[in-house]
Amino acid sequence: MWLITAVVGTFLLYFLITSPHNAFDSIPSGVTSLTLLIYSIYYLFERMKDPTSLYLFSSPVFWVVVAIVIYSAGTFFPFIYARNNMEEAEFKNIYDLIHDTLYIVKNVIFSFAIMIKPKPEKKYAGSAISKKH
C-alpha cells in the first residue's frame, strides 16, 4: 500500500507542477478519487474480516469511509470526462448536479459520523482467555 501511495503522490505532484493553473485538471482529480475508493474499500474489507468488530455501523470511522466511497465512486467518471467536456453547457449542468448532490450527501454522512458515540468493541469469550504456560 505504501508503494501505491508513493506512486500516486508522485503522479499528483508532477501534474501540479506541469499543468496550467487557470483550468480544472480532471486527471489528478480522477486519480485521487480512484485512490480514495481503493483505500476505502480495502479498509472496509479489513474491518469485515475482523471478528471483534461486531458494531461496525456504530463506529464513526465506518460512516466517514462510507461517505468517501459514495463520493469517490460517484464523482470518478464525471471528473475524468470533465477534461474534454467542461466547455459544453449541458455537460456542465449535469456535472454540477452530480458533484453538488454527492458533496451534500458526503457532508451529511460526515455530520452523522460526528454525532455518533462509538460503542465499545465486545470481545469473544475465547479472546479473553489468556494462555499461561
Image: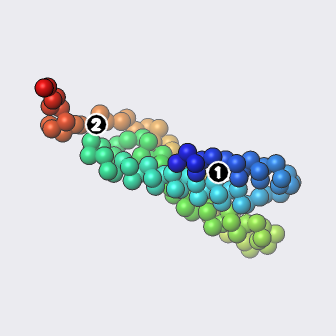
Contact, CB < 8 Å: mark 2 with mark 1? no
Q: In this view of the protein, which residue sits in the foreground, 37 or 91?
A: 37
> In the rendered image of this protein, does residue 30 appear above or below residue 61?
below
Quarter of image, res 92: bottom right
Is residue 113 something one can see in this rendering? yes
Q: Which mark is residue 7?
A: 1
> In the rendered image of this protein, does residue 63 appear above or below residue 91?
above
Place of residue 64 in the rendered image (x, y in percent of width and height, measured from the top left): 48, 45
Is residue 100 something one can see in this rendering? no
Q: Nearer the viewer, mark 2 or mark 1?
A: 1
Query: Would you say 71 lies left or right of 31 here?
Result: left
The amino acid pointed to by label 2 is Glu
* Residue drawn at point x = 74 percent, y = 74 percent: 90
* Residue drawn at point x = 72 percent, y = 71 percent: 91
The amino acid pointed to by label 1 is Val
| Residue holding disc 2 | 121
Place of residue 60 in the rendered image (x, y in percent of width and height, measured from the top left): 42, 41
What color scheme is it?
Answer: rainbow
Query: Would you say 59 lies left or right of 37 here?
Result: left
